[in-house]
């Protein structure tokens, strides 16, 4: 039997480094480096992720035909120099900070990558086998080639790649035609990040907090943003007034003019959130939705395509995605589940296979991402050995016994750690590495946030719902397997608010039950939905089915198996540590069932301060 043709994709040296592997063009493995090193958003060379991906096909680095890197560092360096020259001498501080790193590492990235690769394959000629893809082309390839579409428009929106911040392409068969770009410094991603910074959250990790905070506010500043910061053109393109920003020339996102416009300096991380911050979050979310819709409508008019693929960090804004679906400017939309830079590793490999080497493409009926379950998995015997070595006390149950015990715990209001099968690729836990709860519980959101996740109380949780039952509970007729669409709870499941409740402001609204599943219903009656399919995750589907048989509710609270600031767990040991350091009451790893009360008390730890806050 002939050895498969292997292409290894890499992203690294910015944030969320990752590796992905194709075998004869088929996606066989992908993972972020942070899951192995336990360092959130780890940007280092993804040596552990590479080793894992190759293990899935029993290969070593010397067996790889090509290594594909997700962007072109020389073009990025050109942008750095040109930006500095445009703003000189004002940008000298940021230039002086960035240039030594570029000269030491990034400018000579090819040599750096070859050195890293030669550690495991010293005699291999990597100079001939290392290829580079452009950043937005990598995103576009990650969005189109795994999609279920023979043809589609492709919209990529992020902070910035080399020069591009937004790009339009059209995919057909195994080809992608890049058609139009918006260039740095004009960027939806950087605009959103500016408000992330201004409202006191960390850039490149706190944007989803702004999205979660937005429903607590009113978009009182949206008009101000549109009048002063953003000029949106009829064709969907836009420009940002750089007088209000500082990311080109300085070491912060916003300028003093920005602070004056919005009434004060940025919020410090230790300052309380006020109604003003919630209104700012609501305002930038509303403007972002307007910009995304404007771009998508223009793309539909310009290309005539009826299918749309999305990638780039902005494509993780599930509220905007939900409005885009409901807008109807495209008949079908598919979003790459690893839409950020980690997914660039996969896109780079796909771009080399299809675009440079003209490899054939098979269009899968759902998609070719395998449910995004592309990470490591552990056999039952290995799980038992690892847990035993860690001092865990567990019972091994049959499948039916396991579903019965886990669903009973959930129905009693317990928080359950759920570790099954392959780890998810991308930022969302999808029932492989999840913490689960009963969505009918009015207290479950605050319990999970404060006692399990150790994070802000306002953060919403997502529902996992059986695909066949989704229309019964949510205003969503189709699929949302990757938790990237927001839709409303159906009217008959809602609880109308009283006049007094409607008059509440901000976080005071949090404790008002709004539906039959209050733990996953945000204050605007919306929810970030994951539809669970028996074909891609039969064990998770079986657990939810057992819970539905017990309670009549085919929905579970699903949040990622980690605490604030920690990467999602990867191994059984990671899961047990998190279990013993948090308020999780039961844990299922494979067919091992663990109860907190049965564990050795000496193994408990203070997990709340174990990781740097995100």
Image (tube, grey):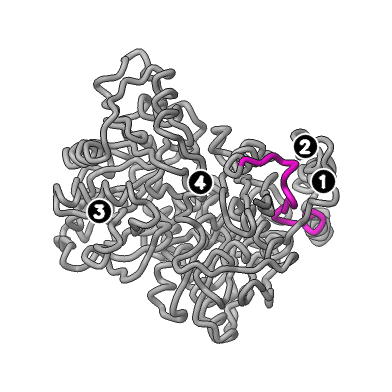
Q: Are marks 3 and 4 in contact (CB under 8 Å)?
A: no
Q: CA distance from mark 4 to mark 2?
A: 41 Å
Label 1 or label 4, whichever lies nearer to me, is 1
- Residue 582 position in % (x across, y down): 35, 29
Q: Residue at x 82, y 46 (%)?
A: 126
Q: Residues within 10 Å of mark 4 (few under 14, many from 20)?
A: many
- Residue holding disc 4: 201
Task: Decide if residue 20 is on the left or right side of residue 103.
Answer: left
- Distance between the Cα atoms at labels 3 and 4? 31 Å
Depth check, front residue: 407 or 473: 407
Gap between marks 2 and 3, in whole Å? 48 Å
> Helix, strand or loop at disc 3?
strand
Instruction: Give above or below for 44 relative to 256.
Output: above
Q: Which residue is mark 3?
A: 555
Q: Kindly give the residue lying farthest to the top in the view shown.
A: 602
Q: Sequence order check: which comes first, mark 1 or mark 2?
A: 2
2 or 3: mark nearer the eye:
2
Query: Of callouts 1 and 3, which one flags the residue occurring earlier in the amino acid sequence?
Result: 1
Q: Nearer the viewer, mark 1 or mark 3?
A: 1
Q: Earlier in the sequence, mark 3 or mark 4?
A: 4
* Position in image of residue 614 (x %, y %): 50, 40
User: Which residue position is annotated with label 1?
Assistant: 126
């Amino acid at each position: 039997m002939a050895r498969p043709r292997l292409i290894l994709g890499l992203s690294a040296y910015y944030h969320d480094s990752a590796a992905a592997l194709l075998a004869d063009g088929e996606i066989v493995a992908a993972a972020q480096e942070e899951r192995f090193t336990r360092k959130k958003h780890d940007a280092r060379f993804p040596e552990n992720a590479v080793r894992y991906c190759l293990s899935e096909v029993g290969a070593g680095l010397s067996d790889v035909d090509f290594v594909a890197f997700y962007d072109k560092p020389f073009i990025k360096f050109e942008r750095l120099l040109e930006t500095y020259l445009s703003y000189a001498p004002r940008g000298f501080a940021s230039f002086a900070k960035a240039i030594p790193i570029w000269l030491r590492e990034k400018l000579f990235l090819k040599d750096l990558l070859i050195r890293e690769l030669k550690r495991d394959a010293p005699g291999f000629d990597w100079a001939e086998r290392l290829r580079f893809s452009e950043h937005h082309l990598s995103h576009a390839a990650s969005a189109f080639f795994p999609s279920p579409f023979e043809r589609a428009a492709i919209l990529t929106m992020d902070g910035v790649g080399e020069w591009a911040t937004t790009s339009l392409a059209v995919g057909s068969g195994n080809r992608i035609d890049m058609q139009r770009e918006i260039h740095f410094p004009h960027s939806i991603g950087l605009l959103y990040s500016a408000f992330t910074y201004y409202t006191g959250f960390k850039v490149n990790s706190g944007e989803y907090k702004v999205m979660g905070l937005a429903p607590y506010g009113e978009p009182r500043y949206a008009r101000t943003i549109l009048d002063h910061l953003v000029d949106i053109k009829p064709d969907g393109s836009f420009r940002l007034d750089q007088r209000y920003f500082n990311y080109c020339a300085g070491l912060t996102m916003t300028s003093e003019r920005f602070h004056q416009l919005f009434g004060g300096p940025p919020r410090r991380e230790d300052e309380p959130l006020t109604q003003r911050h919630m209104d700012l979050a609501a305002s930038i979310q509303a403007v972002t939705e307007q910009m995304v819709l404007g771009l998508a409508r223009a793309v539909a008019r310009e290309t005539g395509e009826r299918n749309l693929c999305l990638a780039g960090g902005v494509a993780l804004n599930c509220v905007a995605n939900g409005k885009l679906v409901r807008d109807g400017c495209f008949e079908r939309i598919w979003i790459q589940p690893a839409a950020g830079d980690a997914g660039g590793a996969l896109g780079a490999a796909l771009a080399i296979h299809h675009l440079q080497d003209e490899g054939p493409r098979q269009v899968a009926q759902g998609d070719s991402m395998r449910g995004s379950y592309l990470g490591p998995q552990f056999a039952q015997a290995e799980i038992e050995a690892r847990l035993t070595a860690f001092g865990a006390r567990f019972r091994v149950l049959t499948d039916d016994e396991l579903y019965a015990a886990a669903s009973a715990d959930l129905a009693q209001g317990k928080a359950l750690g759920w570790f099954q099968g392959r780890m998810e690729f991308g930022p969302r836990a999808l029932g492989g590495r999840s913490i689960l709860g009963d969505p009918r519980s009015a207290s479950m959101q605050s319990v999970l946030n404060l006692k399990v996740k150790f994070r802000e109380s306002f953060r919403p949780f997502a529902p996992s719902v059986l695909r066949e039952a989704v229309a019964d509970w949510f205003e969503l007729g189709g699929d949302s397997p990757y938790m990237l669409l927001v839709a409303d709870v159906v009217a008959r499941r809602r609880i109308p608010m009283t006049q007094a409740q409607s008059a509440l402001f901000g976080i005071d609204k949090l404790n008002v039950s709004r539906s039959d599943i209050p733990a996953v219903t945000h204050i605007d009656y919306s929810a970030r939905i994951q539809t669970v399919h028996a074909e891609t995750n039969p064990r998770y589907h079986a657990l939810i089915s057992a819970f539905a048989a017990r309670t009549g509710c085919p929905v579970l609270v699903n949040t990622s198996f980690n605490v604030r600031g920690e990467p999602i767990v990867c191994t059984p040991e990671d899961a047990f540590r998190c279990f013993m350091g948090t308020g999780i009451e039961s844990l299922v790893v494979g067919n091992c069932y663990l109860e907190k009360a049965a564990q050795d008390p000496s193994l408990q730890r203070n997990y709340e301060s174990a990781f740097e806050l995100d």
